[in-house]
């Protein structure tokens, strides 16, 4: 199997990021001052990556 | 014992680490050390060769004592030799070069060479965490406004760690270091008014306080929400720390960190840099992220409570360019965990007293070794001897004076001497990053040395003590 065949396609990338966004929403409920900002930082990066995919024509639902 | 809200009651994560007994903490360290040794033996040829040369394999390390006795200490010279043989990172990098997301260097003013460190994406997060962690212990909370007075960016760990640390802390950070003059920093603070946390070197805290005094502003009144002053990099007299706290109306905290530590290695608890009663606080080692030993450099044995020794460092959670029993040459007084009074199981070192086994001086945030100045000064053929003096002037600034004695055959005219002083000022600045005042004095005003030269005096502690104000 080639590298092109094994790497996730844009729809799979989008789906994985949506899973991460749901996970980040769970983590965002943590109030520990040591972790709260770290989770917010992670959530911000995931949101930005989803927007980058949006701009590249990979909408929610994972269909390009 | 501390009462009221503590960082370990505010943070369940830190609360669990604080509630461990010493045996559990050491068992955690041993597990992480064993995992580290397995990883390094499999993937890091520099450390694998050193373990092979010492006749030890990861499975031989069954206790912390085994680790201390069987794993050899690594030195700066070992790292430089590795880099020389395998440039630029050396074989101790231990990850594919393509995985390096940040490159940092040590200061390079030792005259011995700069260590090169690669850091992975994961390491960069840990770099931020190892800044955020001590700041959280010192009172920084998500949403706080923080002023970072340390110059940002560049090739140093200290240039990048604060930015990463404040970001993942969820703080609103103003990176005013290096880019704004002291008055402009004060203007910025006055403009936004809300400020909870300041991070600066010891010397810069002094400069900033002098700036406020010069303008007749009392920060304790102007910034009543200020919670924490955090310092690092230089020692200080305890009276200075007490005055700074009174001036600002908040606590002074201190961290001990380094490039090799990927940020802070130790930090003060709620007791602060100065305890109630006026004794020095304890910087607790962040022992679940690093294994820090304080040893007698002559015998290699751990020092006793209250004794001074060299800090030997092992990273427990660093991927690229990790250090394994690295001899830092940093000298500190060992404080066992039970001597602090905060009740946590973390050993530490005395606040305000970090020094060097070599002659390195911290001047305005720069590591300055006399050897670097020697090289610059004695590069001029007419210089016979010199003496250097670091002191705090009447305005509270750290100043450095270099007094030269010339050889008998040096020209006597004033213009030539002024040109010489200008030239050497530039050479010293290039070698150390510190601007020093160079002047010529008669040879008989300088001592002669029959064995090792001791050309430098550091009068800052005394200077800040005599210059203190109320």
Image: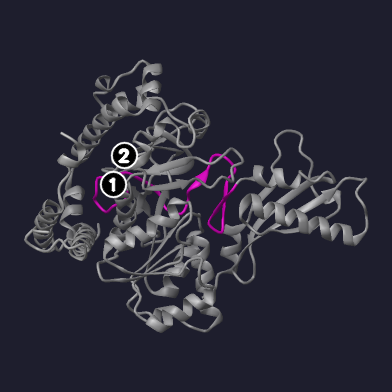
Depth order, front residue of A1/B237: A1
In this rendering, the answer to whether B97 lies above or below B182 is above
The span shown in magenta is: B340-368
Given residues B377 and B217, the one toward you in this image is B377
* Residue occupying the point 38% across, 79% down: B223
Q: Is residue A43 above or below residue B84?
A: below
* Disc assigned to residue B460: none
- Can I make out residue B309 in this image? yes
**Among the 4 quarters of the image, the one containing residue B294:** top left
Residue at the image point whose x is 42% and y is 78% from the top:
B189
Disc 1 secondary structure class: helix
Image quarter (top left, top right, bottom left or bottom right) of the N terminus of chain B: bottom left
| Residue B122: numbered disc | 1
Quarter holding residue B23: top left
Q: Which residue has dot 2 on it? A: B319
Find residue A60 and report its image quarter.
bottom left
| Discs 2, 1: same chain | yes
Gap in angstroms between the C-alphas marked 2 and 1: 8 Å
Residue B275 can be seen, yes or no: no
N-terminal of the pair, mark 2 or mark 1, is 1
Q: On the picture, is A47 further left or further right than B321?
A: left
The answer for which chain carries disc 2 is B
Q: Residues within 10 Å of mark 2 (few under 14, many from 20)?
A: many
Do the numbered discs 2 and 1 sit on residues whose CB atoms are within 8 Å? Answer: yes
- Decide whether residue B362 is among the magenta residues: yes
Vertical position of residue B5 compared to residue B94: above or below: below
Q: Secondary structure at mark 2?
A: loop
On the rendered structure, is B407 left or right of B223? right
Across and down, in percent, residue A9 comes to 15, 49
Q: Nearer the viewer, residue B457 or B388?
A: B388
Q: Nearer the viewer, residue B367 or B101?
A: B101
């Amino acid at each position: 199997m080639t590298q092109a065949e094994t790497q996730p396609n844009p729809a799979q990338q989008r789906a994985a990021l949506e899973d991460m966004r749901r996970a980040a929403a769970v983590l965002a409920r943590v109030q520990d001052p040591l972790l709260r900002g770290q989770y917010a930082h992670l959530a911000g990066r995931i949101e930005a990556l989803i927007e980058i995919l949006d701009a590249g024509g990979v909408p929610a639902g994972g269909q390009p | 014992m501390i009462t009221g809200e503590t960082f370990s009651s505010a943070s369940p994560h830190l609360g669990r680490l604080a509630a461990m007994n010493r045996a559990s903490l050491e068992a955690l360290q041993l597990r992480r050390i064993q995992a580290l040794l397995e990883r390094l033996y499999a993937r890091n040829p520099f450390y694998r060769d050193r373990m092979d040369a010492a006749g030890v394999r990861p499975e031989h390390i069954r206790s912390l004592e085994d680790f201390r006795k069987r794993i050899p200490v690594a030195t700066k010279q070992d790292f430089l030799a590795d880099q020389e043989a395998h440039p630029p990172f050396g074989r101790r990098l231990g990850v594919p070069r393509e995985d390096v997301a940040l490159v940092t260097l040590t200061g390079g003013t030792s005259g011995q060479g700069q260590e090169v460190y690669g850091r992975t994406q994961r390491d960069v997060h840990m770099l931020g965490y190892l800044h955020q962690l001590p700041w959280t212990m010192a009172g920084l909370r998500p949403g706080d406004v923080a002023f970072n007075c340390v110059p940002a960016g560049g090739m140093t760990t200290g240039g990048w760690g604060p930015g990463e640390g404040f970001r993942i802390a969820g703080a609103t950070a103003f990176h005013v270091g290096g880019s704004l003059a002291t008055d402009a920093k004060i203007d910025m603070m006055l403009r936004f008014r809300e400020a909870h946390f300041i991070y600066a070197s010891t010397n810069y805290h002094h400069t900033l306080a002098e700036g406020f005094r010069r303008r007749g502003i009392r920060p304790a009144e102007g910034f009543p929400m200020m919670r924490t002053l955090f310092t690092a990099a230089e020692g200080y007299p305890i009276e200075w720390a007490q005055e700074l706290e009174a001036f600002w109306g908040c606590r002074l905290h201190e961290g001990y960190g380094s490039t090799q530590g990927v940020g802070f290695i130790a930090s003060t608890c709620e007791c602060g840099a100065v305890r109630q009663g006026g004794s020095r606080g304890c910087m607790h080692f962040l022992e679940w992220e690093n294994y820090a030993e304080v040893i007698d450099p002559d015998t290699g044995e751990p020092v006793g409570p209250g004794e001074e020794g060299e800090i030997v460092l092992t990273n427990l959670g660093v991927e690229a360019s990790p250090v394994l029993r690295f001899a830092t040459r940093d000298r500190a007084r060992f404080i066992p965990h039970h001597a602090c009074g905060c009740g946590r199981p973390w050993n530490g070192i005395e606040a305000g007293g970090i020094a060097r086994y070599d002659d390195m001086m911290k001047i305005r945030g720069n590591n300055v070794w006399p050897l670097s100045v020697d090289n610059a000064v004695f590069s001029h053929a007419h210089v016979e001897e010199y003496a250097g003096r670091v002191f705090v002037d009447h305005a509270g600034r750290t100043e450095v004076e270099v007094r030269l004695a010339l050889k008998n055959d040096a020209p006597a005219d004033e213009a030539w001497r002024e040109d010489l002083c200008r030239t050497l000022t530039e050479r010293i600045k290039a070698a150390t990053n510190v601007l020093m005042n160079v002047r010529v004095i008669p040879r008989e005003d300088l001592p002669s040395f029959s064995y090792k030269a001791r050309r430098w005096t550091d009068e800052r502690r005394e200077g800040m003590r005599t210059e203190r104000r109320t």
